Amino acid sequence: EYNEAVARGRDMFYKARNLLQNNDYQEAMNAFSSHMNSSLPDPDNLKKASKRSLASIEKRISSQKNGFMGKARYNLQIGNTRAAILAAEQARLVDPYDYAIAN
């Protein structure tokens, strides 16, 4: 029973890692978070790896989103409204849960 629980925890971690490798950042974040918060035994310290991966994804998303929002603001300032809207839409695709990004 213990070994089965350990195997389930490892499986959760490796599924999350596969999502990350496929650039499915939102689902990977959910999967790493579920793994970290699970009560499954973790003799390999994979929950620490999940925590690091989650922080890395969040940093990547924030950086990409900020880059797109910077482009949006710049284009708006120079009067290129279409490019500003496209950049804001890209930012929203990167972080669909940031409701501060205007629709």
Image: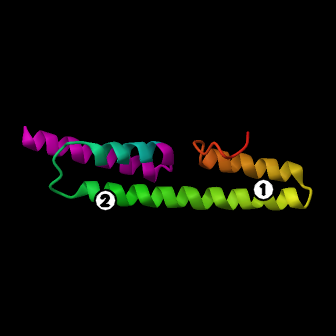
Alpha carbon separation for disc pair 1 and 2? 34 Å
Give the vertical position of 6 relative to 76 (above or below).
above
Residue placed farthest to the left in the image?
A: 1
Q: Is residue 10 magenta?
A: yes
Q: Which mark is residue 49?
A: 2
Q: Which residue range is magenta in the image?
A: 1-26
Question: Looking at this view, is 23 or 75 the one in front?
Answer: 75
Q: Nearer the viewer, mark 1 or mark 2?
A: 1
* Relative image position of residue 86 (x, y in whole percent): 78, 48
Look at 60% across and 42% down and name the residue there: 96
Q: Quadrant of the C terminus?
A: top right
Look at 37% across and 51% down and name the residue there: 17
Residue type at the position of mark 1: Ala
Question: Looking at this view, is 13 or 38 the one in front?
Answer: 38
Left/right of residue 86 with respect to residue 60 in the rendered view: right
Q: Secondary structure at mark 1?
A: helix
Left/right of residue 55 with respect to residue 83 in the rendered view: left
Q: Secondary structure at mark 2?
A: helix
Mark 2 neighbour class, 10 Å CA radius: few under 14, some 14 to 19, many 20 or more: some
Q: Which mark is residue 72?
A: 1
- Disc 1 or 2, which lies upstream in sequence? 2
* Relative image position of residue 60 (x, y in whole percent): 53, 60
In the rendered image, is residue 33 in sight?
Answer: yes
* Relative image position of residue 4 (x, y in whole percent): 13, 39
Q: Quadrant of the N terminus?
A: top left
Residue placed farthest to the front in the image?
A: 100
Residue type at the position of mark 2: Ala
Q: Which mark is residue 47?
A: none
Give the vertical position of 78 relative to 93 (above or below).
below
Task: Give the quarter of the image for residue 92.
Answer: top right
Left/right of residue 102 with respect to residue 3 in the rendered view: right
Look at 69% across and 46% down and name the residue there: 101
